[in-house]
């Protein structure tokens, strides 16, 4: 069994086993002069007649390389072209030099029947103008210019490519054709196409290194995504003429996708399926020689693919705790009949100070629970998250501290912020975790219909972990389910107010989800027990403040 | 050598104390700002309407309407039932075609809520001498009845305008507008009944 290695200039039938192909392709850090040399070496290792055959049916150079499982930087070499390929092969077939040269120009013009021009860096841009880049680098330049034009500040990027499903179908057709024609040859025995690289990956190989240079950062897992989405209005006309050396002939023409179902062995489906589905059906296919029928020769491609280039940053999160000093500020933007309720909202005050500094498209505000518009949020504050969509810049730690200071120094002092910082996706779980179990502490200004007595202070303080039953408060009954909710009042303490016999401060700690106002005034008897029922008189609540949200997240370190 | 960790702890405690103090200062109100008798929860959150002589003389009922559109229905203080010396002794929700206390309304969309006309019966209140029908006053979906009245009918005698309410009804906005004109506001009602 012959083996292949980079410096071997053996001709003709070379068996390529997958590991060797990998060795061949370990082409690191190419420089221009070495480029052609490296390419030369790689191509030498391929079966030249098979390569010529592929060229003749309209497969482009990079597609040929990727079908044979060649990996690495070779795809970004600008020197790749059918002419180079041909010249290398031409050396092996001395008599055909002249004819191979004349075919050169022909191949340059034609769109690859396999990848529809994607790996030839040919496409239609969003204005429907056809674009042909001479090299991977030129295409990378176009991409990097977009990134810079949109003003993204990045320290890494991830490339995502999406190609039309018809490419997978084409690939399968080509492989079957090759198997039929060359299946018995020695070089085929090593399974040369088992390590084929997808068009997506080949494009990524082409663009990654040039982009890393142009954008001055590494490609890999990143919150900044560069998406290349190719689409093609490939006609769905099915022309399948299978002519092979084995003599299997099946002719079927049809104009619809459905008609193909009957003629196809296994589960090839030519329709607009996601790549994954198409791939799955191809993987499982057995080469059933006698009954299959597939699209060959590949349909000529007249139009390039349409390319949509999209840069997106995944959402970034700012976590912290907010305080609300005003009784006229709602937590979130609250508009009824075109009129705003309250004079401002916590959401807008904080969000509007963060979003512009990230140059994000917009923001979303999330908080661990909420308080009414007329209730102040004091003490250590309430945990919140601001999610910024598609931020173009990510502020530094110092910058984030500045945002916090700006908010806290606003003239109207409606809202305050503590411990603001950029957090990862874990901030989300931290907030939601235990939201329903956490206890909250309040201070309520209460009035009762009779003078307060010392015994009252004791009867209130002595109640620990008292269970109450609350029917859905009338004030929210229009939009919430009518339910009886069991809640726990963990402890209570009355603080007398000097100068008043019927007003006092009630400090209490309750289970999350308890309606405090209703616990004080009883909500027409629908919350029981209530302060009024415990003290045997009428009780009213004038003011409420949240003094502690007992949660572990976004605390001062 | 000074123990800096102790200093640090003391500083932290001092800081926390200061925070607590300043928090406390914001919590305590200025007594001079406080009214002698504050408005009740009903006064603050509802608008009171009255339907005097509803379908029958002396059958005075109230409708408290919340900003969210819900209406609390009950017996006004001047209702003829309170003139009986025994006061109200029993309340029965089994009137008309169904027992109103048996309906289970569920979900945000208030499934199963029965639709009633303004003169549909809600319940019967009994004294030693007579019984009186209480009606909806407002056309809408019946969300709940005050079934505490079954065990504690006495609530009506002392607290008819609060814990003794009869039912909660949700009218459609259009239906409310139609009935609103026929109801009296608090001042008009007081003048009418000279109370």
Image (cartoon, grey):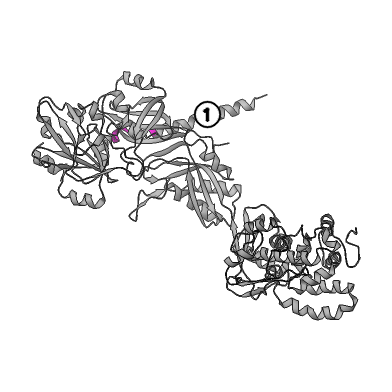
Magenta highlight range: B27-33
Chain letter for mark 1 = B
State the residue position of label 1.
Answer: B14
Q: Is residue B63 left or right of residue A427?
A: left
Q: Please identify the quadrant where the C terminus of chain A is shown.
A: top right
Rendered position, A267 above or below A95: above
Residue visible at 74% across and 70% down in the picture: A60
Viewer-proximal residue among A246 and B140: A246
Residue B136 image offset from top left, x and y in percent: 19, 41
Residue visible at 51% across and 30% down in the picture: B16
Q: What is the quadrant of residue A505 in the picture?
A: top left
Magenta-span inclusion, residue B135? no
Viewer-proximal residue among A296 and B175: A296
Local SS, label 1: helix
Rendered position, B32 above or below A10: above
Viewer-proximal residue among A301 and A458: A301
Q: What is the quadrant of residue A501 in the picture?
A: top left
Q: Can residue B38 be seen in this view?
A: no
Residue A222 image offset from top left, x and y in percent: 65, 53
Q: What is the quadrant of residue A85 in the picture?
A: bottom right
Magenta-span inclusion, residue B32? yes
Q: Please identify the quadrant where the N terminus of chain A is shown.
A: bottom right
Residue visible at 89% across and 74% down in the picture: A93
Residue A250 image offset from top left, x and y in percent: 68, 70
Q: In this view, does B191 lie to the left or right of A184?
A: left
């Amino acid at each position: 069994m012959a083996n292949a290695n980079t410096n071997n200039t053996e001709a003709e039938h070379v068996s390529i086993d997958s590991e060797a192909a990998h060795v061949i392709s370990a082409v690191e850090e190419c420089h221009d002069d070495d480029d052609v040399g490296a390419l030369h070496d790689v191509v030498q290792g391929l079966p030249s007649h098979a390569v010529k055959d592929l060229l003749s049916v309209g497969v482009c150079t990079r597609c040929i390389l990727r079908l044979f499982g060649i990996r690495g930087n070779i795809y970004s070499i600008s020197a790749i072209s059918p002419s180079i390929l041909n010249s290398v092969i031409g050396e092996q077939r001395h008599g055909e030099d002249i004819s191979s040269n004349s075919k050169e120009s022909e191949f340059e013009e034609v769109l690859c029947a396999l990848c529809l021009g994607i790996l030839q860096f040919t496409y239609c841009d969003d204005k429907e103008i056809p674009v042909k880049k001479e090299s991977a680098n030129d295409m990378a330049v176009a991409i990097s210019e977009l990134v810079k034009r949109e003003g993204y500040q990045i320290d890494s990027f991830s490339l995502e490519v999406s190609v039309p499903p018809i490419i997978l179908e084409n690939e399968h057709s080509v492989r079957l054709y090759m198997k039929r024609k060359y299946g018995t040859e020695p070089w085929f025995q090593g399974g040369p196409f088992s390590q084929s690289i997808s068009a997506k990956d080949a494009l990524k190989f082409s663009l990654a290194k040039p982009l890393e240079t142009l954008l001055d950062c590494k490609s890999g897992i990143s919150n900044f995504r560069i998406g290349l989405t190719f689409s093609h209005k490939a006609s769905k006309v099915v022309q399948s003429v299978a002519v092979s050396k084995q003599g299997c002939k099946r002719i079927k023409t049809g104009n619809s996708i459905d008609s193909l179902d009957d003629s196809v062995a296994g589960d090839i489906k030519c329709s607009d399926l996601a790549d994954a589905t198409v791939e799955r059906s191809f993987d499982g296919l057995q080469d059933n020689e006698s009954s299959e029928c597939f699209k060959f020769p590949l349909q000529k491609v007249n139009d390039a693919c349409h390319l949509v280039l999209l840069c997106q940053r995944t959402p970034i999160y700012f976590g912290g705790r907010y305080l609300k000093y005003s009784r006229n500020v709602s937590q979130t933007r609250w508009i009824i009949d075109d009129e705003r309720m309250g004079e401002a909202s916590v959401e807008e005050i904080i969000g509007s100070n963060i979003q512009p500094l990230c140059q994000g498209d917009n923001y979303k505000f999330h908080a661990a629970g909420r308080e009414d518009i007329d209730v102040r949020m004091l003490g250590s504050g309430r945990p919140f998250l601001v999610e910024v969509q598609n931020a173009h810049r990510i502020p530094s730690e110092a910058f984030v501290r500045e945002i916090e200071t700006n908010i806290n120094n606003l003239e109207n002092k409606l809202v305050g912020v503590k411990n603001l910082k950029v957090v990862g996706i874990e901030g989300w779980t931290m907030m939601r975790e235990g939201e329903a179990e956490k206890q909250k502490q309040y201070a309520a200004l209460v009035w009762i219909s009779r003078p307060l007595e010392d015994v009252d202070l004791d009867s209130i303080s002595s109640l620990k972990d008292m269970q109450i039953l609350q029917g859905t408060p009338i004030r929210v009954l229009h939009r919430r389910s009518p339910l009886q909710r069991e809640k726990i009042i963990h402890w209570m303490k009355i603080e007398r107010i000097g100068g008043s016999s019927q007003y006092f401060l009630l400090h209490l700690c309750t289970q999350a989800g308890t309606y405090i106002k209703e616990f004080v005034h009883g909500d027409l008897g629908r919350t029981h027990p209530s302060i009024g029922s415990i003290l045997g008189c009428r009780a009213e609540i004038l003011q409420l403040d949240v003094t502690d949200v007992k949660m572990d997240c976004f605390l001062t370190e | 050598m000074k123990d800096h960790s102790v200093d640090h702890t003391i500083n932290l405690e001092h800081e926390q104390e200061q925070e607590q103090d300043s928090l406390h200062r914001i919590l305590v109100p200025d007594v001079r700002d406080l009214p002698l008798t504050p408005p009740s929860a009903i006064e603050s959150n509802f608008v009171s309407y009255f339907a005097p002589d509803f379908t029958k003389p002396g059958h005075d009922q109230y409708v408290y309407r919340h900003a969210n559109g819900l209406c609390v229905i009950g017996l006004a203080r001047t209702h003829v039932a309170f003139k009986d010396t025994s006061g109200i002794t029993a309340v029965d929700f089994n009137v008309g075609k169904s027992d109103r206390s048996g309906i289970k309304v569920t979900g945000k969309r208030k499934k199963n809520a029965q639709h009633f006309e303004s003169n549909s019966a809600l319940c019967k209140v009994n004294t030693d001498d007579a019984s009186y029908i209480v009606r909806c006053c407002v056309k809408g979906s019946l969300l709940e009845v005050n079934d505490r009245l079954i065990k504690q009918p006495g609530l009506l005698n002392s607290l008819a305008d609060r814990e003794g309410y009869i039912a909660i009804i949700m009218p459609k906005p259009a239906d409310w507008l139609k009935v609103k004109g026929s109801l009296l506001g608090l001042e008009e009602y007081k003048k009418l009944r000279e109370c």
